[in-house]
Image (tube, rainbow, N blue to C red):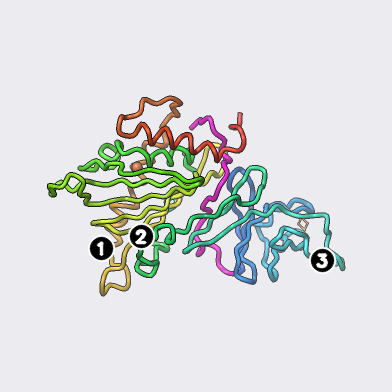
Amino acid sequence: MDVPFTWKPTGWYQIGWSHEFPDGSVKPLRYFGEDLVAYRGEGGELHVLEAHCAHLGAHIGHGGKVVDDCVQCPFHGWQWNADGQNAAIPGQDKPNRSKSLRVWPVMEQHGLVFMWHHPHGDPPAWEMLDIFGCYPDITMPPEAYYSPFPAFTRKDEAEPVHPQIVLENSADSAHFEFVHRATVTPEVLHWSYDEHLWYFIAGWPDTSSDAPDAMRLKIHSKLFGLGGAISAFEGVQRHRVVFSTTPTEHGRSDMFYTIWWPREPGIDVVSDEILARVEREFLTTVDDDLSIWRYQKWIEKPAYSKVDAKGYSTLRKWSQQFYDIPPEA
Ligand code: FES
Ligand SMILES: [Fe+2]
């Protein structure tokens, strides 16, 4: 999709799940049009550096090795530390202090890996939201859910979808009936924003109740910039979802989906029944959306549906703060 925004937006973006980066592993990645190398050093911390060795340009992600807290290039064995500095050169008593690799800040949280991206390499300007801590009033702790890995995760690679499109979907109550076959259309109950965070609540009315504002189910969503949303359900369902979109190249993004499903009393291991239900009802909702997003065209001045107009247009203005560079030609 052609959009009037850069595919190199600023913010925190998911680049995978922690279990994909075991101790001592070195892995090539490609995000924001850049070749990257991820490695888990001896201290157990995950690091991401630019991939091409500053000696003679080998891609360290293909064949590199972890040595202490450094990653060693497969070509001539130069070692790079977590700060991107050259730490050792075989056969020389001193490293080359003038050579370094760009460091990409990463943080792990509840099994998800997020990377900070700024097009000019500026350091993180704000903290990533806490997946569980960001809903102090919906107090189920992580242990109250089944581990999402790997059964309740899903990744769609290199989709032609810009994060802006996914973001706008969260302000769009009118698509549920058509795209997601909802029998009751949700109402937007609240939206607000605070710097890099957008918060909205939608609710599905309880049609069996006489009270007009009784809700069967509510979804709370907090958007961490353009990178994705942390959602918590309240009511007849109580699961939690992180849905993220991370540009890989100009015109393409990877999409990550992680569901925390509440443990059922007496059932320690996820049953086939729960698995099938989550797969059928939740992991596949992204297919519904993708069947629209893949072929959608950007409309600069949409005719908003009445219910969504204010939130939608405000969300578009709010999202401008993450575009620090003009769109690529
Ligand atoms: S290219 Fe990496 S050590 Fe030579
Ligand atoms: Fe949707």
Mark 3 C-beta to ligand 1 under 8 Å: no
Secondary structure beneath dot 1 equals: helix
Are discs 2 and 1 less than 8 Å apart at CB?
A: no
- Say which amino acid is labelled 2: Asp
Q: Residues within 10 Å of mark 1 (few under 14, many from 20)?
A: few
Residue beneath the point at 38% across and 49% down? 221
The dot on residue 90 is 3
Could one spot residue 255 in this view of the protein? no
Residue beneath the point at 69% across and 63% down? 71
Q: What residue span does the magenta drawing correspond to?
A: 1-23
Q: Nearer the viewer, residue 316 or 90?
A: 316
Q: Nearer the viewer, residue 21 or 209?
A: 209
Of marks 2 and 1, the one in the foreground: 2
- Say which amino acid is labelled 3: Pro
Q: Which residue is mark 2?
A: 137
How many angstroms separate mark 1 from mark 3 (CA)? 56 Å
The correct choice, above or below, for 4 with respect to 89 in the image is: above
Where is residue 186 shown, x and y percent of the image?
A: 26, 43
Where is residue 65 shown, x and y percent of the image?
A: 67, 65
Q: Nearer the viewer, residue 99 or 76?
A: 99
Where is ligand 2, by quadrant? top left
Where is residue 278 shown, x and y percent of the image?
A: 30, 57
Residue beneath the point at 61% across and 68% down? 24
The correct choice, above or below, for 286 with respect to 21 in the image is: above
Residue beneath the point at 36% across and 67% down? 146
- Say which amino acid is labelled 1: Glu
Of marks 2 and 3, the one in the foreground: 2
Q: Residues within 10 Å of mark 3 (few under 14, many from 20)?
A: few
Q: Nearer the viewer, residue 102 or 206?
A: 206
How many angstroms separate mark 2 from mark 3 (CA)? 55 Å
